[in-house]
Image (cartoon, rainbow, N blue to C red):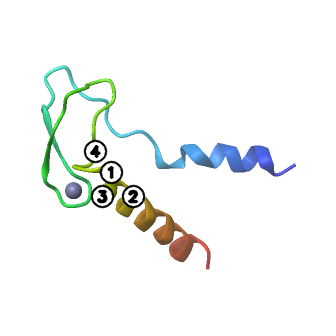
Amino acid sequence: MGEFAHQNQQGRHGQQGQPQHRGPVVVPCKWCHKPVAQTRRWFPKQYCGRWHKWKHRVTEIVGEVLGGGA
Ligand SMILES: [Zn+2]
């Protein structure tokens, strides 16, 4: 019965601001803040590489477990 409530929690992060029409073409990597050139506006790259994407993902997951599990 609790599965529905669990799924609803996925939206608690909220959406970041939608990209403006005149928004920046370069977005800093979420891990190392290195400028990342955007080539596909419908799927913006948030990391300079997939390895940094994984690092950031793992850090987020670990942070949630440590911060919200206690
Ligand atoms: Zn990076």
Residue drawn where x is 62% and y is 49% of the image: 9
Q: Name the foreground residue: 41 vs 21.
A: 41
Quarter of the image for residue 44 reads top left
Q: Is residue 24 left or right of residue 12?
A: left
User: Nearer the viewer's eye, disc 2 or disc 4?
Assistant: 2
Q: Name the foreground residue: 8 vs 41.
A: 41
Residue 4 x, y percent position in the rendering: 77, 43
Q: Which residue is mark 1?
A: 50
Q: Are marks 4 and 1 in contact (CB under 8 Å)?
A: no
Amino acid type shown at disc 2:
Trp
Q: Are marks 4 and 3 in contact (CB under 8 Å)?
A: no
Q: Which residue is mark 4?
A: 46
Query: Crowding at label 2, few (<14), some or many (≥20) Cα neighbours within 10 Å?
Result: few
Q: Are marks 1 and 3 in contact (CB under 8 Å)?
A: yes
Q: Are marks 3 and 2 in contact (CB under 8 Å)?
A: yes
**Residue at the outermost right position:** 1
Mark number for residue 54? 2
Mark 2 to mark 4 CA distance (whole Å): 11 Å
Residue drawn where x is 41% and y is 67% of the image: 59
* SS at circle 4: loop
Mark 4 to mark 1 CA distance (whole Å): 10 Å
Amino acid type shown at disc 3:
His
Amino acid type shown at disc 4:
Gln
Amino acid type shown at disc 1:
Arg
User: Nearer the viewer's eye, disc 4 or disc 1?
Assistant: 1
Q: Are marks 2 and 1 in contact (CB under 8 Å)?
A: yes
